[in-house]
Image: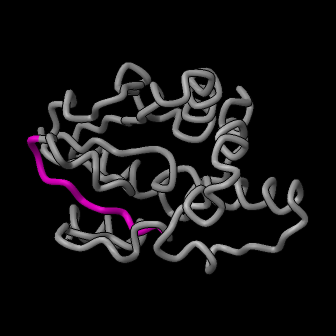
Amino acid sequence: MKRIAIDMDEVMADFIPKQLKIYNRDYNENLTIDDLQGKKLRELRPHIKEELRKYFLDPTFFRDLEVMKDSQEVIKELSESYEIFITTAAMEVPASFTAKYEWLKEHFGFLNDMNFVFCGDKSIIHADYLIDDNARHFNRFMGQGILFTAPHNINVTGYVRVNNWQDVRKYFLG
């Protein structure tokens, strides 16, 4: 059975709306997802990069993120034909481990939690495919990288790209 590794943030978990909501509240702004086209928030506001990072250091930040549209249904379908691994670069934010695990158990409880991989360098994953919103994870990955569209990667080229979970379904299930 072929293996698909799937990133969490901005692929399964809708990370940006919560980040923008907190940022807009804290800084009395009205930034939208459209303002992030081609950039991350820390690139738009480099003078407060460390303050923005503190959002993720809150151990509960990742616990209540919205589920990406259609991800549950498509991943369940994929799990019937592929071995599924959930891979998150959680070593970048160690405080997120518990929240991310609980979020996965709540929203993707049909998956084997022994296939949840909390790592740094995703090239350690032995999979045929990696669906991720950050192309840097494809650099040393031995399988096929598939870029999941997110506002920050809209201008990234050179990779197989899927725009949503319906595209993922078509790519893998025809």
Residue at the image position 30 percent from the left and 71 percent from the top: 156
Task: Return the residue nearer the eye: 96 or 37.
Answer: 37
Where is residue 171? Give x, y as percent: 22, 68
The span shown in magenta is 142-150
**Quadrant, the N terminus:** top left
Residue at the image position 74 percent from the left and 73 percent from the top: 31
Where is residue 42? Give x, y as percent: 59, 56
Hey, which residue is sitting farthest bottom in the picture?
A: 34
Task: Return the residue nearer the eye: 128 or 84.
Answer: 128
Residue at the image position 55 percent from the left and 64 percent from the top: 69
Task: Return the residue nearer the eye: 17 or 127.
Answer: 17
Q: Is residue 65 left or right of residue 138?
A: right
- 145 drawn magenta: yes
Which of the 4 image quadrants contains residue 158?
bottom left
- 24 drawn magenta: no
- In this rendering, the answer to whether 48 lies above or below 92 is below
**Quadrant, the C terminus:** bottom left
Where is residue 149? Give x, y as percent: 40, 69
Residue at the image position 69 percent from the left and 61 percent from the top: 17
Q: Is residue 50 left or right of residue 139?
A: right
Which of the 4 image quadrants contains residue 164?
bottom left
